[in-house]
């Protein structure tokens, strides 16, 4: 056990999203290479004790890996004035503070993964990706690939989705990304539409490494709603649609609250039914 490599993985949730975080944790462990263990860190936005006990059950059901689960608290005052929507809450912004929250852990890099995903592949392959001297590795956002002018930025770089990132903590801290992103949120609020993601793109342009889109197969990509920005991405998009490694249920329609067709809804709900949150999820589905 002691010779296994450790992957630190961070997600974020409030109590409403705790059941879906359970699916994220479960499917990560289901597909993880046996040579790796995981340290899960959850940015905690008032997750209940009951939900935390169920999340602990999720990871304790996996005997092939040693997995730990710890919670991180953010100073919510830093984000008191941010813009929210019906499916993006203040919790989404908390990843901006992540390197500060892990400062005493001495990790070189971490994976950040949103709590509304279905993992279908071994994330150790993702974690071991060499992103060079970049601050983060991420996946292009198909619907927003060339919107930097909206943010007042002139660049040839593409715009990424912030729901999955390999974060080089040292490079992030050296470049003062947290401070710069908070400043962008405060000073450019009139330009922001896509919440924390706009602010991160406004700060990290030309500082991010493009990962294969299969690692963050967003809803608009799965349904091929947008033209790829170049020929290489055309090839990548086809590969991601045919065999996604992580399905990311972006947008308003989620498997648990919508009858809108999505090819991975049934598989997602099956995974959800195999967690300690199965009853909660059924009740929420009935309400919705």
Image: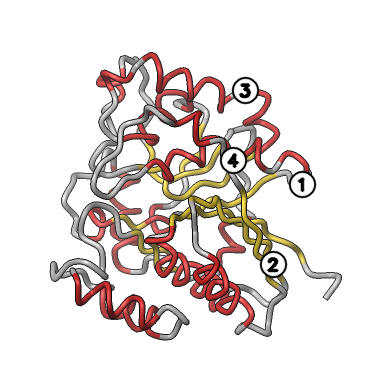
Q: Nearer the viewer, mark 2 or mark 3?
A: 2
Q: Mark 3 and 4 residues: CB-CB less than 8 Å, in contact?
A: no
Position of the N terminus, as image quadrant, is: bottom right
Does the CB distance between marks 2 and 3 fall below 8 Å?
Answer: no
Instruction: In the displayed orientation, state which residue is furthest to the front.
Output: 49
Residue 256: image x %, image y %?
26, 70
Q: CA distance from mark 4 to mark 2?
A: 18 Å
Image point 34% across, 15% down: which residue? 154
> Image quadrant of residue 161?
top left
Location of mark 4 (residue): 98
The residue carrying pointer 4 sits among few (fewer than 14), some (14 to 19) or many (20 or more) residues within 10 Å by Cα, namely many
Q: Do labels 3 and 1 touch, CB within 8 Å?
A: no
Query: Which SS class for mark 3?
Result: loop
Kindly identify which residue carries mark 2.
68
- SS at badge 1: helix
Q: Is residue 89 above or below residue 40?
A: above
Disc 1 crowd, CA 10 A, few/some/many (<14, 14-19, 20+): few
Q: Which mark is residue 4?
A: none
Please give the residue where the numbered disc 3 appears in the rendered image: 175
Label 2 near label 4: C-beta < 8 Å? Answer: no
Q: Tell me the residue at 29%/80% (across/down).
A: 282
For label 4, the SS is helix
Extreme residue toward the right, this view: 2
Q: Earlier in the sequence, mark 3 or mark 1?
A: 1
Give the side of residue 114 with respect to residue 258, left or right.
right
Classed neighbour count for the residue bearing mark 3: other residues with Cα under 10 Å, few (<14), some (14–19), many (≥20): some
Q: Residue at x 47, y 18 (%)?
A: 183
Q: Which residue is mark 1?
A: 105
């Amino acid at each position: 056990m002691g010779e296994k490599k450790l992957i630190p993985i961070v997600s974020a949730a409030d109590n409403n999203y705790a059941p879906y975080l359970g699916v994220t944790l479960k499917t990560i462990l289901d597909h993880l290479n046996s040579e790796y263990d995981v340290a899960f860190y959850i940015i905690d936005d008032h997750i209940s004790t009951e939900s935390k006990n169920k999340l602990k059950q999720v990871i304790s059901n996996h005997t092939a890996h040693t997995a730990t689960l710890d919670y991180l608290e953010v100073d919510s005052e830093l984000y008191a004035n941010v813009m929210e929507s019906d499916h993006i809450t203040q919790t989404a912004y908390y990843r901006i503070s992540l390197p500060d929250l892990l400062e005493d852990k001495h990790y070189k890099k971490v994976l950040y993964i949103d709590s509304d995903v279905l993992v279908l592949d071994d994330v150790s392959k993702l974690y071991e990706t060499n992103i060079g001297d970049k601050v983060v590795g991420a996946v292009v956002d198909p619907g927003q690939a060339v919107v930097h002018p909206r943010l007042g930025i002139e660049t040839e770089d593409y715009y990424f989705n912030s729901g999955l990132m390999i974060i080089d903590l040292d490079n992030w801290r050296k470049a003062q990304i947290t401070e710069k992103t908070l400043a962008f949120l405060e000073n450019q609020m009139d330009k922001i539409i896509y919440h924390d993601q706009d602010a991160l793109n406004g700060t990290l342009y030309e500082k991010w490494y493009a990962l294969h889109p299969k690692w963050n197969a967003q809803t608009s990509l799965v349904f091929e709603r947008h033209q790829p920005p170049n020929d290489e991405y055309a090839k990548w998009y086809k590969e991601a649609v045919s065999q996604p490694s992580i399905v990311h249920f972006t947008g308003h329609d989620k498997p648990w609250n919508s009858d809108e067709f999505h090819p991975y809804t049934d598989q997602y709900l099956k995974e959800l039914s195999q967690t300690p949150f199965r009853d909660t999820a059924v009740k929420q589905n009935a309400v919705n």
